[in-house]
Image (spheres, helix red, strand yellow):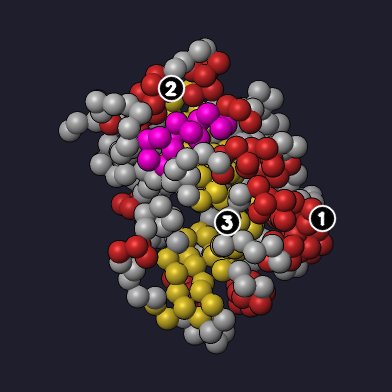
Amino acid sequence: MTTPALQTDPLAPPLLDAQGRRMTYLRLSITDRCNFRCTYCSPASWGGKKDLLNAEELGRIAGIFAALGIRRVRLTGGEPLIRPDILEIARRIASIPGVRHLAITTNASHLEALAAPLREAGVDQLNLSLDTLSPETFRRISKQGDFDAILRGIDAAAASRYASLKLNVVVMRGVNDGEARALVEYAHARGITPRFIELMPFGQGVPVPTAELMDRLRGEGLDLSAEPEETGAAADSVTSGPARYWKAPGGRVGFISPLTQNFCGGCNRVRVASNGDLRSCLGGRAQAPLHQLIRGGATDVELARAIRAALGDKPEGHRFTEPGNGATLLSMMGIGG
């Protein structure tokens, strides 16, 4: 097989992985620090890295990926909004030619003040993490943080005219699995699409299979019907992701099922962790030290070649379910959520 590393012009699209899948979506972690300590994401011992990519370096990396065919960039963390230069980072990346969509995943704790400025800076999509509507359960999961500030932040986002707002809920058995119906109603009341995510093997907790959760929602009276398959422009690979959506009376409901309904066959994503390492797969080890290369004086062509070489080792799937693999993974904070 001809690998991506052998492309005639390293800085020209397409950007392909070892299976020939076209990469159009960059998840760019800008910090591995967070103001929460969620049990499934951030181990208490995680101190964070001090030498993070600066705004100029993040913009350069995003620009190279855009030249290679990336059309959607998502800023992640840790919690990306704790960076004091978040608006500068957003403006830089939103202005890059070829970047059609700029999204952020956030726990919403800083959104009351930042929702409107981020929209003005060019962010058009937000994923808001909220696992519970109970202050007590929130403290059990997150260990710290201001629950009321999160709710105010979500309301501020809903009022700021984003093109897309999604509410991400990580479902844990015996913790928040009984709140799914209430979270659907909470999200739909604000024009937000709720998405329920099977717990991945990065931290503590017991996952709930999507099929079981859907059966429970239907048993509680929520009418879920399959959406028709999208084709043509509606199935744009730039915006498509791992969620499968169903219609409900108040709007759409999404389910992300990495364990029981593997979505790797249609993968279009590549990740750069907060330390500047490109990670070709959330559950894999293939990487390229972009941070070191940049500070070592690498040219854009050399960076593009390193990116293509790492993607040439991208596995067919994440292999989360293989025995013992979960124990070898970094925390979600270390990789980029």
- Mark 2 is surrounded, within 10 Å at the Cα level, by few (under 14), some (14 to 19) or many (20 or more) other residues, namely some
Pick the residue in front: 156 or 323: 156
- Give the residue at x 25% y 28%: 7
Q: Secondary structure at mark 2?
A: helix
Residue at the spot of label 2: 300
Apparent side of residue 33 relative to residue 322 in the rendered image (left or right) = right
Q: CA distance from mark 3 to mark 2?
A: 28 Å
Q: Which residue is mark 1?
A: 146
Tell me the mark number nearer the camera, choosing from 3 and 1: 3
Which mark identifies residue 222? none
Residue 312 seen from this side:
yes
Q: Amino acid at mark 2?
A: Asp
Whole-percent x, y for residue 26 in the image: 47, 42
> x%, y% of residue 92?
60, 37
Q: Quadrant of the C terminus?
A: top right
Q: Is residue 150 visible?
A: no
Residue 296, position in %: x, y? 52, 12
Residue at far bottom of view: 221
Q: Which residues are magenta?
A: 58-70
Q: What amino acid type should be assigned to the residue bearing mark 3?
A: Gln
Foreground: 42 or 98? Answer: 98
Give the residue at x 79% y 53%: 113
Identify the mark at residue 125; answer none if there is no mark: 3
Apparent side of residue 6 relative to residue 126 in the rendered image (left or right): left
Main SS, magenta residues = helix
Q: CA distance from mark 3 to mark 1?
A: 23 Å
Write the residue at 56% across / 51% down.
103
Lower position in the chain sequence, tag 3 or tag 1 = 3
